[in-house]
Image (cartoon, rainbow, N blue to C red):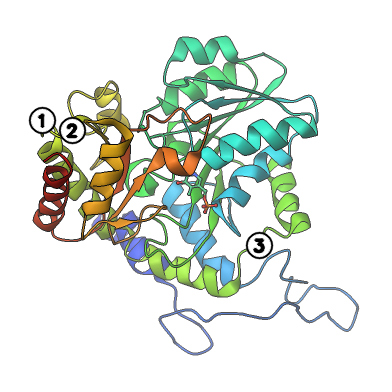
Amino acid sequence: MAADERDPSPETLAAQALGSVDGATGAVVPPIHPSTTFLRDADNSYATHGRVYSRADNPTYDQVEALLNRLEGGQGALVFASGMAAATAPVMALRPGDHVVASSVMYWAFRNWLQDYATGWGIEVDFVATEDPVALAGALRPGQTRLVWIETPANPLWTVTDIRGAAELAHGAGALLAVDSTAASPVLTRPIELGADLVMHSGTKYLNGHSDVVAGVLVTARDDAYWQRINAVRKNLGAVLGPFEAWLLLRGLRTLFPRVRTQCANALDIARALDGHRGVREVLYPGLAGHPQHALAARQMQGGFGGMLSVRVEGGMAAAVRVAAKTRLFHRATSLGGVESLIEHRASIEGPGSPVPDDLLRLSVGIEAVEDLIDDLVRALDLAHR
Ligand SMILES: *Cc1c(COP(=O)(O)O)cnc(C)c1O
């Protein structure tokens, strides 16, 4: 294929936000549209502009949704007010009596919502170890299971589920597969190409990347009736993103590729440096050869294993909390995917009933110089284990 026939690479599309220039002004950065309402035509229709009210959509979404759709290889994208708004919408678009199968290790707030709220609305939910195909197959109820929800790598143990295998099992039972791809980002994994029907992201994390926007994203493999119901959920529940946040999300996406690549390289170096430290019981990172799904991760994730890892500290919860108290560069805070490194004692935020061991520290690795980050962690571990 001649070079001028080739589609630009995803990194080019992201850096240039699809190459679009504002037709009205020539601006290479798109405008923000704060308007909540749009002109109706004299004939009482909305034919000229096609937009009515910003609880349905807003022109500031167009470019960021188009870019996200391209990066994921989808047939439609929607931005939401948060990752939780994006995750809950596909479940709220189901009917009472429908059955959902979800990963037992997954983002804690969404697991709680499925357990506490979705079941209260008549949705039946089972949690299984989706990384085990036998367990996943056993949980499916052909004809009743509508949605299989996996998260990979899954927070905060970084368990990896085979997307292609899960899609085959889900489809075989007449269900759809949704993938929370927040930790992987479209830089590392494109779930729709592997058979997924829906891809979800907390845009708060890698997509925006600067810890200054709360946002959510869904991308669909098909523009069908179910997708239209999801769209109606966003509109009717008002789970819409503010125009300024949509604009910031697009701005953040321009640097997605270099950020995630640096974060992956830093995380791998940190995982290797801490593996075997006397203060560390175990390093959980799909990029380490000893990770139970390392081979699968190497197949499914392209160009890196992500910027997230967890460390189980020798000496239990007290020692883990001591380590987090001693870091100087890693900030003690929740969330992930930003350019600055964060450390968190995860069991404290998840509370009782969490499957997370209480000696676990979750690290979100940023783009700082990796030797500074390693020194910071080794120093904190040494101080906590004196
Ligand atoms: C943060 C997160 C969410 C929730 O997203 P919010 O933007 O905080 O609502 C869902 N899944 C994963 C994996 C996350 O890290």
Give the residue drawn at x 30%, y 24%: 296
Q: CA distance from mark 2 to mark 1?
A: 7 Å
The percent position of residue 75, horizontal first and vertical second, equals: 56, 47
Q: Secondary structure at mark 1?
A: loop
Between 79 and 284, which is closer to the camera in this rendering? 284
The percent position of residue 156, horizontal first and vertical second, equals: 38, 37
Say which mark, if any, is on residue 276.
1
In the image, is 166 to the left or to the right of 80?
left
For the residues bearing labels 2 and 1, Cβ distance under 8 angstroms: yes
Between 156 and 16, which is closer to the camera in this rendering? 156
Label 2 Cα crowd, 10 Å radius (few <14 / some 14-19 / many 20+): some
> Given the image, on which type of amino acid does mark 1 rest?
Gly
- Disc nearer the start of the sequence (2/3): 3
Residue holding disc 3: 240
> Given the image, on which type of amino acid does mark 3 rest?
Val
Residue holding disc 2: 280
For the residues bearing labels 3 and 1, Cβ distance under 8 angstroms: no
